[in-house]
Image: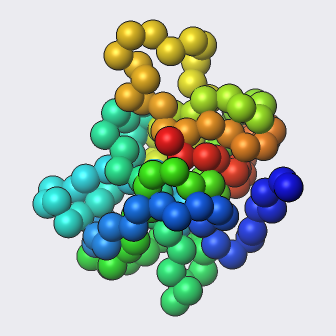
Amino acid sequence: MPFVKPSNKILVAGAPLSEECVTEGALVKPGLLVVKGTGDHQVGLAGAGAVNVLGVADYDARYNIADAFPDNHPVRVLSGPAVVVLILAASQTIGKGDKLIAAADGQAQAYPGTPSAGDEEKIIGVARESVTTGGAETKPILVELK
């Protein structure tokens, strides 16, 4: 049975690990990849090619799913084996099964080529659907986190 991409949540399937953290800055949104902030309890957006991605920021029903959380806001970070909705960066052509890595601003992008030694740690998951974005657009994409 295929996965259905929801418009109002991040977790699609699975039982991921869930860590309670707080945002550092006001840029973290649901569906974006996060890394450790200044403190172990804080998270900020992952950068392009990040090797230290903790997971994805989950949805909070108190906010619109497209809005950033305020600074120092509690946020659940989902990781581990699960299917989630991430935000795909601009100018991407992704096929189902393609490996993905972090892009700028916590978004996801295609892994360029075949993983070489030491690059496996950059791969955050595998696309569970095919999605193409234009030069100035981002779109949600179903991803199976590793």
Residue at image location 68% in from the left, 39% down from the top: 127
Question: Where is residue 135, by image quadrant?
Answer: top right
Depth check: 53 or 79 in front? 79
Residue at image location 45% in from the left, 52% down from the top: 80
Residue at image location 37% in from the left, 35% down from the top: 50
Name the side, left or right, on which 77 lies relative to 128: left
Name the side, left or right, on which 4 lies relative to 16: right
Name the side, left or right, on which 122 lies relative to 134: left
How far across and how far down the image is residue 93, in percent? Answer: 76, 30
Q: Can residue 87 be seen in this view?
A: no
Depth check: 22 or 134 in front? 22
How far across and how far down the image is residue 83, in percent? Answer: 62, 54
Q: Can residue 112 be seen in this view?
A: yes
For the N terminus, the quadrant is bottom right
Residue at image location 60% in from the left, 29% down from the top: 99
Q: In the picture shown, does residue 13 fall above or below 61? A: above
